[in-house]
Amino acid sequence: MLFIDKNTNISKLEIQKEAQENGLFLYIDKQQDWTSHDVVAKLRPMLKIKKIGHSGTLDPMATGLLIIAVGRGATKQISELQAKSKVYTATMKIGATTKTDDAEGDENNICDISHITDTDIENAFSKMQGEIAQIPPMFSAKKVKGQKLYHLARKDIEIELEPSYVTLFKNTITSIDLPFIHFEVHCSKGTYIRAIARDIGNELGVGGYLTGLRRTLIEEHSVENALTLTELQQMIERNESL
């Protein structure tokens, strides 16, 4: 099946033909502040194709790789892509919490972190490896009894959540610049990086939340050659004029 990235030259008509006959995939580099659904909604009128889906949600704050399935033949394979492991680069801040577990929320529980050492941080990360039990963030699209958690959270309805078991194949500190910690995670499907930041903050006893997130890999698929929507539009226009 065709994968379209920065190395591809293709026109809109060729995309439409391939989507109808076989289906295809787009490597898209999602920009910040867009939801994954926003990307799909922008692609439909751009390509004049309705049957489009994505291979795994990225929060609005996050950037990075979205694999977009275009056409029925491709959308049937979305579940296979969603099941693949992911790699993220991330930044968290310690010494405060937010209701959303990321920078979308206001800071609460601000506290002193002058006693926190690099060794403390390394020990906290060492406990966040392998298979872990993770409580999803309340402000998330996870469904409980048919309701998305963020709908309940916005109404200040709190419920006791069951943990999900996820696997962190690698969870590595890349640099420490307190109050910020930069790290890279290779994880299984269903992992919330916001929850990792929250739980490491709790382990340190000072709280923490996610301030930056970028998805770089979906198994063998890399963001390195992914197209922004602007670049995709420019590529289509360039090939239309040939």
Image (cartoon, helix red, strand yellow):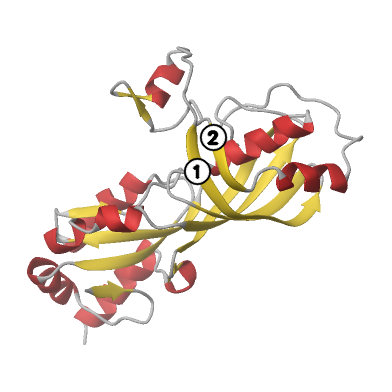
Compared with 108, 53 (above or below) is: below
123 to the left or right of 12: right
Q: CA distance from mark 2 to mark 1?
A: 7 Å
Residue most extreme to the front: 131
The residue identified by callout 1 is 166
Front one among 49 and 189: 189
- Amino acid on which the number 2 mark rests in the picture: Gln
Determine whether the residue tagged by mark 2 lies in a helix, strand or loop: strand
Compared with 121, 239 (above or below) is: below
Task: Decide which of tag 2 and tag 1 comes sooner along the chain.
Answer: 2
Q: Quadrant of the N terminus?
A: bottom left
The residue identified by callout 2 is 134
> Could you classify mark 1 by the number of other residues whose Cα lies within 10 Å: few (under 14), some (14-19), or many (20 or more)?
some
Residue most extreme to the right: 115
172 to the left or right of 82: right
Determine whether the residue tagged by mark 1 lies in a helix, strand or loop: strand
Query: Which residue is at 39% across, 68% downward?
Result: 227
**Hey, which quadrant is residue 12 in on the image?**
bottom left
Query: Which residue is at 52% across, 48% downward?
Result: 167
**Hey, which quadrant is residue 238 in on the image?**
bottom left
Query: Which residue is at 14% across, 67% downward?
Result: 19
x and y, in percent, of residue 26 in the image: 30, 66
> Could you classify mark 2 by the number of other residues whose Cα lies within 10 Å: few (under 14), some (14-19), or many (20 or more)?
some
Query: Which residue is at 14% across, 58% downward?
Result: 49
105 to the left or right of 227: right
- Amino acid on which the number 1 mark rests in the picture: Val
**Residue 32 has which mark?**
none
Front one among 204 and 50: 204
x and y, in percent, of residue 108 in the image: 69, 22
Circles 2, 1 touching at the beta carbon (< 8 Å): yes
